Amino acid sequence: MNTFMNKYIRPAIVLTVLLTVLTGLIYPGIVTALAQLIFPYQANGSLHTVNGKVIGSDLIGQYWTSPRYFHGRPSATLSAATGSPAPYSADNSSASNLGPTSAALIQTVQQRITQLRKENPNAPTGPVPVDLVTASGSGLDPDISVAAALYQVPRIASERGLSKDAVRQLIMNHVQGRFLGIFGEPYVNVLDLNLSLDTLK
Amino acid sequence: MPVSLNSVLQVLIFLVLVLLITKPMGLYLTRVFGGNHTWLSPVFVPIERLFYRLSGINPEEEQKWTGYVIAMLVFSVAGMLLLYVIERTQQWHGPLFNPQNFGPVEERLAFNTAASFTTNTNWQNYTGEQTMSYLTQMMGLVFHQFVSAATGIVLAVALTRGLARRSAQTLGNFWVDLTRAILYILLPISIMGALVYVSQGMIQNFNPYTVVHTLDGQTQLIAQGPVASMEIIKNLGTNGGGFFNANSAHPFENPNAFTNLIIMLTILTIPAGLFYMFGKMVGNTRQGWVLWAASAVLLIIGLAVIIPAEQSGNPLLAKVGANQHLSDTQAGGNMEGKEVRFGITDSGLFATITTDTSCGCVNSFHDSYTPLGGLVPLTNIALGEIVFGGTGSGLYGMLMFAIIAVFIAGLMVGRTPEYLGKKIERKEIMMAALALLILPASILGFSAVASVVPFGVSQLTNAGPHGLSEILYAYTSANGNNGSAFAGLSGNTPFYNWTLGFAMLIGRFAFLIPILAFGGSLVKKRVVPAGLGTFPTTGPLFVGLLIGVILIVGALTYFPAYALGPIVEHLLMQAGRTF
């Protein structure tokens, strides 16, 4: 029994304590200190400030409802407090988890398409870009495809009294390409686009 | 086929990167577990010695397989209890480490989570940003992400020693191997990797959640926390348990295509390196490259199914007016549960890699994949995560298939099978078969029960065949210690917390004990020189045989269940049925 204690129990307990302190406190402590020192903007959430006020994070999608702004993707997040649908709840990320043959999924997408067409009466008819009518994985997707941005051009142009060409040009100036031209997909960050939209005259 | 040139290019470049990493990582692993001097030794040797002195460990003393297993089990129990206690005492974690003031984790959920992180599964029946304090995330979960990964690695090393050593008794010292795995491999890579991640926008702070008022007049509460330090070890150790509920789909946990690429590479770094280390230690690196090649083929087979399936999209969505065509301005495809910055290729590649290994982190939600797309991750896990596989578990799982393959080859030519010059006899085959049978028995057994009892089926989000897929996926993931989910299944109930918790413990420990017994039996054997009748295990013929055995064993075991789940759902989807 004594040898079992010395050979197994003591090393297990002492090593657990030592490794907990090393990997659970010292390691994240060192990383946090270095991160805050070298990359404070990123480490604290890439928070975007306008006139001294924080208006969001560059990386976290927001719920856009005004017709004067570009809209993002549908979001399946729920309110953490009530459990009822609350798009872009950035303290309660989640996907819809609806399967491909779910009647709820198909009906929801159909309703979104109807709503989208109502909001964008002058948009081209025909099928709408899929990312504008499907919920993202995080529920916080900050981006839309270029096609989804272009789809909204007629609405933004008429709401803001701008030419369609000017709005289209603005989108093209804000397309983020693939990493090294190879990895990922091109996209437009909705907050970035809307911020520059506000500066257009 | 609806696949773009860019898609093919991404996959090819990725595979080349994995190839380039394999040898340097393998050589480094060989040095570390050979007890050799490395460039980090000046820093870590003093810490190592201090650890051994305080723990009363004699680093020179080696253990037989039984000693190695007992040490591993006692250590796992200690860590599991510690995590349970940390979870249950969150109310005392204080404002710095628990700024959102989360209360103690409910008992059964705390048990499930403790089992989950101890077994390297990282199945999560909770929403991280609404349940766990920063202290629990760091000291409870990240600690296990280090030690469970290290445990997997050292067991693979011990098994390799069993094959490499001749007429010996011992497999190494568990405590020494474990300490070295953490100090020399996991910790240094994690510190560097975490800082790279922060530079790209992953967060790393102890702030309370931030309130923002948007241009559109909305109020948003943004979660914060020490994310980057968890993200790196989560993937390097093929753990997979994320800080946030959305895991690597969350922009703070995977901000762009560059971090996504690094995540996928870190998942495969150690498993691929271990294949090389294995070859090096048994004295013929081709023995390792054979396993690597078989893995690469199986990886590509998975990708050849999942990417076209997802890119083709969902015909039911096309019918109601969604444009899923790939074009210059959109990736198209089945975008439900996926992020725009990753599109189809990076989501499909990620889903394949995370289930080829025992990682289980996700950057898109598998439950919303098309039936055939979702079948790929499910099958990958069910085959035992041997396509590169988990940290350590990939190598030892793959070696069990290799033993079965030489056994079958031996039966065909009527000779006693040999592997690496060691005769494979009754005891070894029994242990290998036992290890490979425990997994499907547990997966199919638990799934069968859950799909008929009311508290099993009441937790499904999706009806019809997809519901069965959700249950199958849950127990496959738990037994395979993967941790990804068809997340429509609400697992935070007493029934699922208990059964999934036990499935995870069975999948880890009931699998490991026969494997180490196998190693302990082989280490004693002499090596017989290869003769004319020896089946060579270094050529393309063996790669083919190995892949054949893996697929046939897997297909025969799971095909009936899959026919009732994803396969019938695919046919019904094509016919326009919804549930």
Image (tube, grey):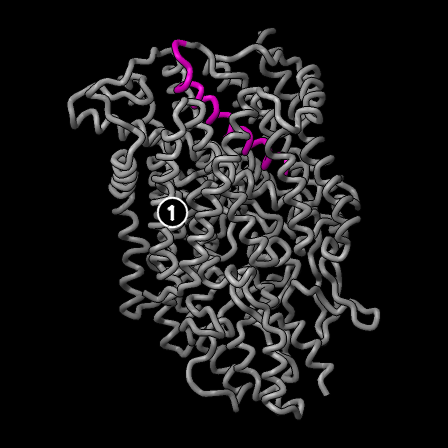
Q: Quadrant of residue A59?
A: bottom right
Secondary structure mainly formed by the magenta segment: helix
In the rendered image of this protein, does residue A185 appear above or below residue B290?
below
At 58% from the left edge and 28% from the top edge, which residue is drawn?
B181
Q: Is the residue B476 above or below the residue B130 in the image?
A: above
Q: x and y percent of residue A7 in the render? A: 59, 12
Q: Is residue A123 magenta?
A: no
Q: Total marks drawn?
A: 1
Q: Nearer the viewer, residue B467 or B168?
A: B168
In this rendering, would B202 be left or right of B92?
left
Which secondary structure, mark 1?
A: helix
List the residue tagged with mark 1: B299
Residue drawn at the location 39% of the way across and 69% of the way down? A103
Based on the picture, tell me whether residue B165 belongs to the magenta stretch.
Answer: yes
Q: Quadrant of residue B321?
A: bottom left
- Magenta range is B141-167
Q: Quadrant of residue B318?
A: bottom left
Instruction: Classify residue B63 as left or right of residue B561.
Output: right
- The amino acid marked with disc number 1 is Leu
* Residue B257 locus on image (x, y percent): 56, 58
On the image, the x and y values in percent for residue B492 come to 53, 47
Judge whether B524 appears above or below B490 on screen.
above
Q: Is residue B314 left or right of A91 when viewed as pictured?
A: left
Q: Quadrant of the C terminus of chain B?
A: bottom left
Chain on which label 1 sits? B
Residue B468 visible: no
Residue B310 seen in the figure:
yes
Q: Residue furthest top?
A: A2
Residue A68, percent across and down? 66, 84
Residue found 35% across the figure and 58% down from its top: B371
The residue lying toward the viewer, choosing from B133 and B392, is B392
